[in-house]
Image (tube, rainbow, N blue to C red):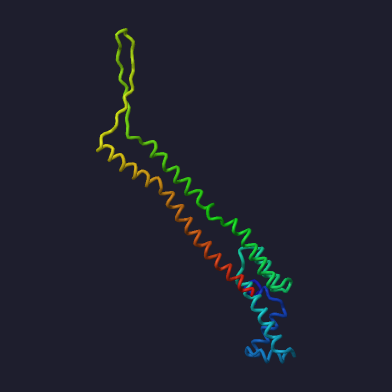
Amino acid sequence: MANEVLPEWISNLEDEDLAFIKKFILASGSLKEVAKEYSVTYPTVRLRLDKLIQKIQLSENTESEPYISLIKRLAVNEKIDFDTAKILISEYKKIYLSKRQNKWTGLVIPCICLLLSFLPILGSVSYYSSTKTFTDENGKVISEVVTTKENDTAAGSETASMILLFLFCNIPTAVYMAIYFACREKIKKNSELEKMNILDLE
């Protein structure tokens, strides 16, 4: 079989791992038979199998964070013990990922859209102005600005129009909020999966 079509988990295994899998299959999955083949004790074969399983799981569950993937790989390759790996990954998630996944950051754009939606409302006034011009006894021209409030019927119509305008202007806000909650839900699920991956190190 060409190497480029091999599953990734097989490509990451060493030659001795593949030899162990071959003997395990030929022994019909009997660890006792494999122990006889290697002339070792049953617990030794069991330990070898457990480490091989962990290595395959590591290849299958590739971490999006290179640091976490590196720590797990070091643990599987016995460069560091699993307890130390768990502590390093846990502290990394607390410090780095918590900063990068700040829930308030995603609310910046929706808040800006919400504030901008008030601008058309503030520009819509319920008053109109008119200018009256007249001449006094000395022949001097005097201008007077008169502000008139709309009647109740017009005011009610204006209020309804402003509500519709406000809702229309907040369509982008609603869209961004939907995206925000969808992303937060995805982050939450990924966080739960990452916690499960930490437990895999036990």
Name the side, left or right, on which 83 lies relative to 147. right
Q: Position of residue 46 (x, y in %)?
A: 67, 85
Q: Nearer the viewer, residue 58 or 120?
A: 120
Q: Residue at x 70, y 80 (%)?
A: 17
Q: Nearer the viewer, residue 190 or 55?
A: 190
Locate residue 45: give its quadrant. bottom right
Q: Position of residue 136 (x, y in %)?
A: 30, 11
Q: Residue at x 28, y 40 (%)?
A: 157
Residue farthest along the top direction in this orientation? 138
Name the side, left or right, on which 40 lies relative to 98. right
Locate residue 125: give its quadrant. top left
Q: Nearer the viewer, residue 34 or 18?
A: 34
Report the number of numbered marks: 0
The answer to whether residue 194 is above or below residue 138 is below
Name the side, left or right, on which 152 lies relative to 6. left
* Quadrant for the C terminus in the image: bottom right
* Quadrant for the N terminus in the image: bottom right
Q: Position of residue 187 (x, y in %)?
A: 53, 61
Q: Nearer the viewer, residue 4 or 56?
A: 56
Locate residue 59: give its quadrant. bottom right
The answer to whether residue 184 is above or below residue 166 is below
Q: Residue at x 34, y 42 (%)?
A: 162
The answer to whether residue 37 is above or below residue 91 is below
Q: Position of residue 83 (x, y in %)?
A: 68, 72
